[in-house]
Amino acid sequence: MATKPPVLDSDFKYIDKKGNLLKSRTELAVAQMLSFLKQDYQYGHKITLNDMKTVFVDFKTQQGLIEVIDSDEDITKYKMIKEQMPDTKIMAIGHPKYVGQLKELDEIMFYDAKDPQTGSIFLEDPSFALDFAHILPLVEKCSILHGHTSSVMIELVGQMKNNLLIDFGEAKRIIKNAITILDHKFFINKKYLKNEDSSHYQIAFEGPKGMFDLQVPKDTTYLLEGEATVENLSTEIIKILAPKLPSNIEAVGVYIYEGYNKGAHIISNITKP
């Protein structure tokens, strides 16, 4: 029996909110964190070293440079910048396989264990798949009843304790329970609700494809504040997740893929009493 080839990081396309095509998930995480902190950045910043050699640093911010170390070439580049431009503020982040080789440098960043550390984790799992039906009366192509199977990825951001944000097993349990609430549901903007009884909603609207008048069971219908877009579904997942997460989680990011190579990403701060 033929086996499927492994899915590699290089098989995915990572695009930040500015439209930059990034090289890895780590770079995407850095871009998301900078955006979350409202820090403007330039991706692929060009630097001319003292020996006139040109190199490109992954991120330039107002506070300094960030280089994601993914290869031996990145290590060489990082060391060249540190040696030839000692006044330049630069930090490295990446896989321990490579970053560990920079420990001989005094300038490599370190964490003060007495101060809280902000960190983020992301979780993808086949059990996070979401099957749903929806109607978007404002979009001609999507103004009829149709469905999707969407994969979901969750990012959690907050204060770490003992270098741990949240146990992956606990996070997976919370996320799966939240997604189960929305799985196999029909989503529709509540403004199209015309009537209801103890067991059914009456949904009616005039759309590009004509007049729709549907009677749908309450237990399989999910009324939304706003249109049933994947952006709005991301927001709804955050609303469900937020009260279930530990108090050290300060923000949640939700990715929902709708079809191939397209989807939505929403990240939101969490305010808890």
Image (cartoon, helix red, strand yellow):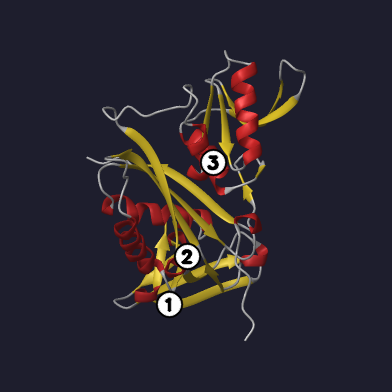
Can you identify the residue that label 1 sits on?
216
Residue 91 on image: x %, y %? 52, 27
Q: Quadrant for the C terminus, please.
A: top left
Label annotation for residue 188: 2
Q: CA distance from mark 2 to mark 3?
A: 48 Å
Q: Are marks 2 and 3 in contact (CB under 8 Å)?
A: no
Q: CA distance from mark 3 to mark 1?
A: 56 Å
Q: Residues within 10 Å of mark 2 (few under 14, many from 20)?
A: many
Question: Residue 265 or 56: which is nearer the viewer?
Answer: 56
Question: Residue 10 or 170: which is nearer the viewer?
Answer: 10
Q: Are marks 3 and 1 in contact (CB under 8 Å)?
A: no
Q: Which of the 4 image quarters holds residue 218?
A: bottom left
At mark 2, the secondary structure is strand
Which amino acid type corresponds to the residue marked 1 in the rendered image?
Answer: Val
Residue at horizontal 67 percent and vertical 66 percent from the top: 141
At mark 1, the secondary structure is strand
The number of discs equals 3
Question: Residue 14 or 206: which is nearer the viewer?
Answer: 14
